[in-house]
Amino acid sequence: MSLGWTPIAEEAERAARLRHPDRHGMPKPAHRRILTIANQKGGVGKTTSTVNVAAALALHGLRVLVIDLDPQGNASTALGVEHRTGTPSVYEALIGEIGLVEAAAVSTASDNLLCVPATIDLAGAEIELVSMVARESRLRQALNDDALDELNVDYVLIDCPPSLGLLTVNALVAAQEVLIPIQCEYYALEGLGQLLSNIDLVRSHLNTALHVSTILLTMYDGRTKLADQVTSEVRQHFGNTVLRTVIPRSVKVSEAPGYSQTVLAYDPGSRGAMSYVDAAREIAEYGSHMDEQTDGA
Ligand code: ADP
Ligand code: MG
């Protein structure tokens, strides 16, 4: 009997893992990982992927910090973290007014999940930063080892705004890795060249450790031929960097933030939730073997 290989058995196994995440913990990374979730196109699933991957890692025993670097504050909302004006936020941490630890709040999604929220004040930061000293490395300074040790986190995920401005540059300077979400739709690859050349620029001038470690295909609609074409084109181009897990287009995923929740809390048994858990597991497995890999930096 090879029941273990049937799709139904596989689904049942995934569902069981989801109901009892503590029994199926994800491995700690070889060293703390800082990932920037970037793509200058809006609406490709940056925020959705940031919060749901973060929640999945946290629910499986890892300590995670999300930095909301988009003035819209959508990641803060989805994680159930206050982000009204006046709330200690990433803005004050960037301009050096407060430390990271002061700005971090615990998410309603998990006690293991912290979030430094973005308030509308961040909208002005893009311009204010221009005249500041070390304007490209303000976030890196805020994310110093002492602060991250104090918060005791295994993962830092930085959710970028939909532009290649100074906020995104700060995120690229602060991270070792870039996770690029790609929407399985027409024009999906448009603008990707520009993002990659910006990453190259940051690597050669400001952050030699930076590399694209992870590509996540999102909003996959199995009914369209186009989705498959985009998927295979991306896989051809980026090879192993692309996660095997593809996030399906799912109404549950888009409804969850309306309830200030991740999809894992909103509907843990949904395909969207399970895919994000699978994607997070792939990310965690890769991280646990990182020191054995040679293509790191
Ligand atoms: P970005 O941060 O790149 O601008 P978002 O994560 O905010 O993109 O996603 C854009 C919109 O698409 C949001 O309304 C979000 O709820 C929706 N969305 C994201 N992923 C999915 C999905 N897998 N299925 C359905 N809707 C999705
Ligand atoms: Mg966003």
Image (cartoon, helix red, strand yellow):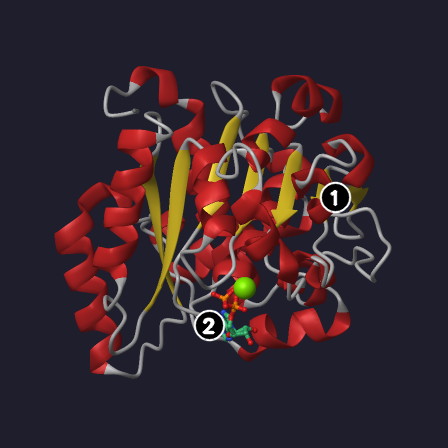
Front disc: 1 or 2: 1
**Residue 10 horizontal/vertical position (percent):** 44, 54
67 sits left or right of 233 in the view: right
Q: Nearer the viewer, residue 192 or 232?
A: 192
Instruction: Classify residue 24 by image quadrant.
Output: top right
Disc 2 under 8 Å from ligand 1? The reply is yes
23 sits left or right of 271 in the view: right
Disc 1 under 8 Å from ligand 2? The reply is no
Hey, what amino acid is under mark 1?
Glu
Q: Which of 201 and 116 is in front in this view?
A: 201
- Residue farthest toward the front in the current orientation of the protein: 131
Q: Image point 56% across, 56% down: which residue?
A: 127
Residue 175 higher or lower than 125, as above or below:
above
**Residue 261 horizontal/vertical position (percent):** 72, 63
**Mark linked to residue 173:** none
Can residue 277 be seen at all in this image of the molecule? yes
Residue at mark 1 to residue at mark 2: CA–CA distance:
27 Å
Mark toward the start of the polypeptide (1 vs 2): 2
111 sits left or right of 43 in the view: right
Q: Which of 280 and 159 is in front in this view?
A: 159
Can residue 52 be seen at all in this image of the molecule? no
Q: Image point 43% across, 28% down: which residue?
A: 287
Q: Disc 2 on helix, strand or loop? A: loop
Instruction: Classify residue 57 by image quadrant.
Output: top right
Residue 205 higher or lower than 161, as above or below:
above
Residue 41 higher or lower than 212, as above or below:
below
**Residue 163 horizontal/vertical position (percent):** 43, 61
**10 Å crowding of disc 2: few (<14), some (14-19), many (20+):** few
State the residue position of label 2.
43
| Quarter that holds the C terminus | top left
Hey, what amino acid is under mark 2?
Gly
**Mark linked to residue 92:** 1
